[in-house]
Image: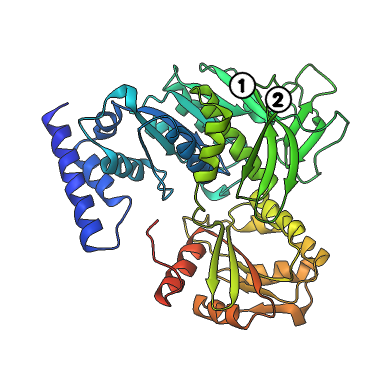
Amino acid sequence: MTIRGSLAINIGKIAQWGLQTFTKGGTSLPGKLAVKLDPDVLQHLSENFDVVIITGTNGKTLTTSLTYHVLQQKFPHILTNPTGANMEQGIISSFLEGYSRKVKKERAFAVLEVDEASLVKVTKFIKPKVIVNTNVFRDQMDRFGEIYTIYQKMVDGAALAPDAVILANGDSPIFNSKELVNKQIYFGFNHEPDGDTLAHYNTDGVLCPKCQHILRYKFNTYSNLGKYYCAHCDFKRPELAYAVTKVDKLTHKSSSFEIDGHPFHTNVAGLYNVYNALAAYSVGKHFGLTPEEIQAGFSAAQQKFGRQETITVDDKEIILNLIKNPVGLNQVIDLLNYEEEPFSVVSILNDRPADGTDVSWIWDGNYEKFLDFDIPKVTVSGIRQKELTLRMKVAGIPEEKLEVLPEITDVIKAFKKAPTKKIYVMATYTAVLQLRKELANQGYIAERMK
């Protein structure tokens, strides 16, 4: 390592120690300092680690957590970026925290969530063993553009690490649409008998990349995912190396299912989270773990920031869900099907850069489904509360059930007065941060940096 690299690492670690000792922490500043001193610092930090990168639109944070806990069952030294700081500076900071010159390559792993647009910046320095592609959905149009633009960024990033194996969601047509320099291994669902159906008419990514006809499905799990095929050419889902073979039980708090005939259970709900578990399973199997070790990792994984996070406010149970695009929103709404107790809903929409400044995606969200449930109150807040209020009215929410609140402090007051014990919160990224900060100020949770 160069003198410049050593200096950058030492200064970064000192900054990290100071922030953790004298403030509430911080995820990106030490990385910013280190990379300013040495633009190649990430290469130096990662050179003794076997790296697994998790990228894609939805599911990165939970898949990273599950994968970390799975691999931890076998490997003694492993680091990750648990707060979801998934751009270059945050990843550098994660390495700074876990860096030790005593680490030997055969014992050191890093499981990293990486923003899909930042992948090309990360793989310039890190040469991962495995890259996991979770999915590609329309997200933050102001930043990413269409799904094909997002995927091209992922392809370009992977190409800088040509020896990396890509574990890709085989149920996503886009991951089978290009020839790559990387070896690809696929995972997906084989839990239903073959039929014949189409995806919902308001779904992206369902055109055959070869002949541009609309794809059909032997079965469709959600959005554009499933056992797809083209009736006009030979394009179809590739062979799966790892597959969900049975879905036993889905509740509002957990999921029981089988992968390759082995039973598994996770304490997270929703079919979309079964995909995340399947991705983590695929990584575990790739590195030689047994189904029993993988289940132990699933059991050890903790509740993640804003992902079905449960917070108690007086006598109320708040279930906090991060939303950022229509596919993710619709999957959260679908979770309400499993709820057996009365509940209220709070939706908070911000448009800061970290949220995405284009909020037109709310019109693709299935808010109309709220009418299928006996929801006594729907509360709306956030910077773009006016647009969200209009969306709720168009969805048919009666005005007497609709409450509009300007401030986060008002939302917390509304929690305490809610007509139900359970309250489902659907909030964009910075809204989750605001809400958690105010809950910490009022003593309901411990504040954490993200």
In the image, residue 132 lies at what x, y percent? 53, 31
Residue 228 seen: yes
Please tell me which residue is depicted at 51% across the width and 58% down the height of the picture: 429
Q: Is residue 78 left or right of residue 366?
A: left
Q: Residues within 10 Å of mark 2 (few under 14, many from 20)?
A: some
Please tell me which residue is depicted at 49% across the width and 69% down the height of the picture: 435
Q: Secondary structure at mark 1?
A: loop
Seen from the viewer's position, the closer of residues 355 and 165 is 165
Q: Amino acid at mark 2?
A: Pro
Residue extending furthest front?
292
- The picture quadrant where one finds residue 188 is top right
Location of mark 1 (residue): 178
Q: Amino acid at mark 1?
A: Lys
Residue 206 seen: no
- Residue 130 drawn above or below residue 376: above
- Residue 356 drawn above or below residue 247: below
| Cβ–Cβ under 8 Å for marks 2 and 1 | yes
- Residue 50 drawn above or below residue 361: above
Dot label at residue 251: none
Q: Secondary structure at mark 2?
A: loop
Seen from the viewer's position, the closer of residues 258 and 195 is 258
Q: Is residue 39 left or right of residue 137?
A: left
Whichever of callouts 2 and 1 sits on the residue coming sooner in the sequence is 1
In the image, residue 359 lies at what x, y percent? 60, 58
Q: CA distance from mark 2 to mark 1?
A: 9 Å
In the image, residue 115 lies at what x, y percent? 46, 41
- Residue 78 drawn above or below residue 208: below
Q: Residues within 10 Å of mark 1 (few under 14, many from 20)?
A: few
Q: Is residue 326 left or right of residue 199?
A: left
Please tell me which residue is depicted at 76% across the width and 29% down the height of the picture: 227
Location of mark 2 (residue): 209
